Image (cartoon, helix red, strand yellow):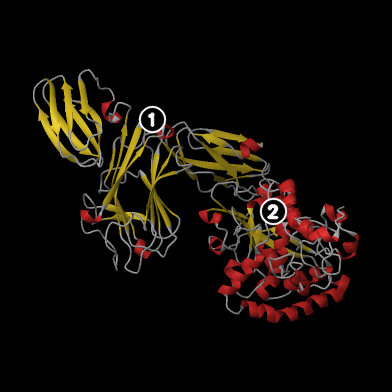
């Protein structure tokens, strides 16, 4: 037990949260985000705060009436729960086991069955309460279908953890307590709102994934976050009141609406001093509504206040435990074999890379049998058969099925999961993409569009830099913050010294003002698992190519386009499955266009590698000097056989010069007036070809 002199307690209160966080958790623990979330909620829903204040008197009277009933108030309320795991295939996609562990801890805390009740200090042992509330995962969804009570949704909003994220999936609050698990809980360990007649579609608890349960990404030190947030969800403030400011002198004047929780300053985050006295009484530091991170109990007064909330129609809390809802949500049904289901860490993979399969079947499964669609099957009863990893040996699309059994029956997944396995070098080399109808990788399905929100990349039939078509985003329809991407299949860059990626783009601001829209060129060396931004065009710098437009912007000619050539030289990208992606993030500007994407690989000799494979350098050769040049260069050409053709193309693939070389032997050709940039000098004779790269300086 700490014996801290009163004069040192303010200092200790400041340093102990840091010390406790570093020693027990290797990081400073996070606070609850309820006060901030409540303030934001009240700002959106006019009248919510006033209504809550007006109802406080009746809330206290209802709680007092329940206290007076004493032992007669002994009905156990059952609350159906659904977990929504919002993830981006990262560690935030926690296991079912971690969720079940969190539920076990929650129920133990609410029934005062937690093993650490023996550590409650003497001053509060007699008022530590069994809340007589139990939480059970739903076994039926809102449509009455069999369900595990756990949903998994992949979305980048997991990094926000806000109310917008809740709109991805939300079950009716009069039937379920919605719990969200995400990579972020808006900067907190977790948060929720007090019961309210407003905001039915955002009612629920949000938890940061590493504050869920005591296993997996979390630990025992952070395992009471759900218990704390359930207190808020059932109308409990913090022990020092409805703020996120513990350890302030004014807190001694604030009541939390519960008679048997002493007035207190509140413990700083992670500071556990069970002898702490701040407002003339011993603080209930071990209360679940404290920030001490050594919580052990609720009080009888808190029990009454939460049960009053469950007997109120406010936020439909009284509907949750009704017999009809218990039947509708199936929480008391036997765990019968019901459904075969599974998830994967990806549905598109490059040849030779593994796909991780995770069983999501229910209930009571004892054996798993997998059909991976490529002639390979796997069955067994161990964890390796329940959640296998599989590597496909050939490219293509494969339908995967899972059959599960429990000894008395079996069931097979209804709809197959289709896994697309990309071959190496699926794109032509060099690549030329003009988005014209019936030709090029786009028409062959080798570009995929992924849209997080807003308008997607799509074809514009009547606008192009060269040709009739281009790719564009109807950004004029976006409000800002929307993201869309288009991603290629694989390009074989193995053995190359550098890769050139060139493209044309067009964009304008609206006449209402300058915006900072973003167009990014990204490349991936690992088949799309990670991405590196190679070029970043911004609306306030280099993205605009035309004057501002009041209506929809459509470039009227080539003068309203510009281009970029990106050279990639890092050898880590010289892989057989290089992928290219264009990402556009809206900030409220006008339409954006993309056209004439070209990818060239150049070997260490300056040759465009794909064009010189199998050619003999002794029968066909080029020398270009000086290189780099300032616009004039000399080409020395050597060939065997009759006639040759010398050509010069710019980095976008356009022919800028061509000359027929007659006879057999060699020839010197002078080139003059070349524009700044990269050029490719080609020599063709019969079925032979070689190419050299020439850099013209600005």
Query: Which quadrant holds residue 653?
Result: top left
What percent of the width, then of the height, locates residue 259? 82, 73
**Residue found 60% across the figure and 35% down from its top:** 379
346 or 31, which is in the foreground? 31
Q: Which of labels 1 and 2 is toward the front? A: 2
Q: Residue furthest left?
A: 662
Which quarter of the figure has residue 200? bottom right
Residue named by callout 2: 29
Question: Reading the chain from its start, which is encountered first: label 1 or label 2?
Answer: 2
- Number of other residues with Cα within 10 Å of mark 2, as a class: few under 14, some 14 to 19, many 20 or more: many
Q: Is residue 579 left or right of residue 407?
A: left
Q: Position of residue 220 (x, y in %)?
A: 74, 49
Picture residue at 67% right of the left edge, 70% below the top: 194
**What secondary structure is marked by label 2?**
loop
In x, y percent, where is residue 626?
A: 22, 30
**Residue identifier under label 1:** 494
* Quadrant housing the C terminus: top left
- Compared with 137, 572 (above or below) is above
């Amino acid at each position: 037990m700490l014996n801290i002199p009163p004069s040192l307690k303010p200092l200790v209160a400041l340093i102990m949260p840091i010390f406790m966080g570093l020693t027990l958790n290797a990081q400073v623990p996070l606070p609850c985000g309820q006060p901030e979330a409540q303030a934001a909620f009240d700002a959106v829903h006019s009248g919510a705060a006033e209504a809550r204040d007006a109802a406080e008197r009746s809330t206290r009277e209802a709680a007092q009436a329940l206290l007076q009933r004493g032992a007669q108030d002994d009905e156990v309320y059952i609350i159906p729960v659904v977990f929504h795991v919002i993830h981006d295939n990262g560690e935030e996609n926690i296991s079912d086991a971690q969720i079940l562990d969190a539920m076990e801890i929650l129920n133990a805390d609410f029934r005062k069955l937690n093993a650490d009740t023996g550590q409650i200090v003497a001053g509060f042992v007699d008022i530590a309460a069994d809340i007589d509330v139990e939480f059970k995962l739903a076994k039926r969804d809102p449509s009455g279908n069999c369900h595990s009570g756990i949903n998994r949704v992949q979305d980048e909003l997991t990094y926000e953890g806000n109310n917008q994220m809740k709109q991805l999936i939300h079950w009716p609050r009069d039937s379920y307590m919605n719990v969200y698990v995400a990579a972020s809980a808006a900067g907190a360990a977790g948060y929720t709102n007090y019961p309210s007649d407003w905001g039915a579609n955002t009612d629920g608890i949000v938890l940061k994934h590493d504050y869920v349960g005591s296993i997996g990404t979390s630990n025992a030190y952070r395992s009471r976050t759900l218990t704390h947030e359930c207190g808020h969800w059932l109308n409990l403030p913090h022990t020092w009141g409805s703020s996120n400011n513990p350890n302030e002198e004014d807190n001694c004047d604030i009541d939390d609406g519960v008679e048997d929780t002493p007035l207190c300053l509140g413990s700083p985050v992670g500071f556990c001093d069970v002898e702490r006295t701040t407002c003339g009484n011993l603080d209930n530091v071990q209360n679940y509504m404290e920030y001490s991170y050594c919580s052990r109990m609720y009080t009888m007064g808190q029990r009454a206040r939460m049960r009053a909330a469950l007997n109120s129609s406010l936020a439909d809390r009284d509907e949750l435990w009704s017999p009809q809802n218990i039947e509708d949500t199936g929480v008391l049904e036997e765990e019968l074999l019901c459904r075969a289901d599974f998830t994967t860490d990806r549905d598109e993979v490059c040849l030779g890379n593994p796909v991780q399969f995770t069983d999501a079947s229910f209930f009571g499964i004892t054996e798993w049998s997998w059909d991976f669609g490529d002639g390979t099957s796997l069955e067994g009863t161990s964890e390796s058969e329940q959640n296998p990893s599989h590597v496909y040996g050939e490219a293509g699309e494969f339908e995967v099925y899972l059959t599960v059994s429990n000894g008395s029956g079996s069931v097979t997944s209804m709809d197959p999961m289709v896994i697309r396995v990309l071959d190496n070098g699926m794109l032509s080399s060099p690549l030329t993409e003009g988005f014209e109808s019936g030709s090029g990788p786009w028409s062959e399905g080798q570009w995929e569009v992924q849209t997080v929100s807003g308008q997607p990349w799509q074809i514009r039939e009547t606008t192009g830099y060269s040709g009739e078509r281009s790719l564009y985003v109807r950004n004029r329809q976006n409000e800002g913050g929307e993201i869309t991407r288009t991603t290629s299949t694989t390009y074989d860059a193995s053995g190359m010294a550098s890769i050139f990626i060139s493209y044309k783009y067009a964009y304008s601001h609206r006449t209402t003002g300058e915006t900072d829209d973003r167009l990014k060129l990204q490349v991936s060396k690992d088949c799309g698992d990670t991405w590196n931004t190679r070029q970043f065009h911004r609306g306030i710098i280099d993205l605009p190519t035309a004057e501002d437009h009041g209506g929809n912007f459509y470039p009227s000619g080539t003068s309203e386009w510009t281009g970029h050539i990106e050279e990639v030289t890092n050898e880590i990208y010289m892989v057989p499955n290089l992928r290219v992606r264009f990402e556009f993030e809206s900030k409220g500007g006008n339409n954006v266009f993309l056209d004439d994407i070209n990818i060239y690989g150049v070997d260490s000799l300056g040759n465009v590698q794909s064009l010189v494979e199998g050619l003999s350098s002794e029968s066909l050769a080029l020398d270009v000097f000086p290189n780099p040049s300032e616009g004039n260069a000399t080409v020395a050409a050597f060939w065997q056989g009759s006639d040759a053709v010398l050509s010069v193309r710019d980095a976008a693939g356009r022919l800028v010069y061509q000359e027929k070389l007659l006879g057999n032997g060699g020839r010197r050709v002078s080139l003059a007036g070349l524009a700044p940039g990269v050029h490719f000098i080609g020599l063709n004779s019969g079925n032979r070809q070689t190419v050299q790269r020439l850099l013209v300086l600005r």
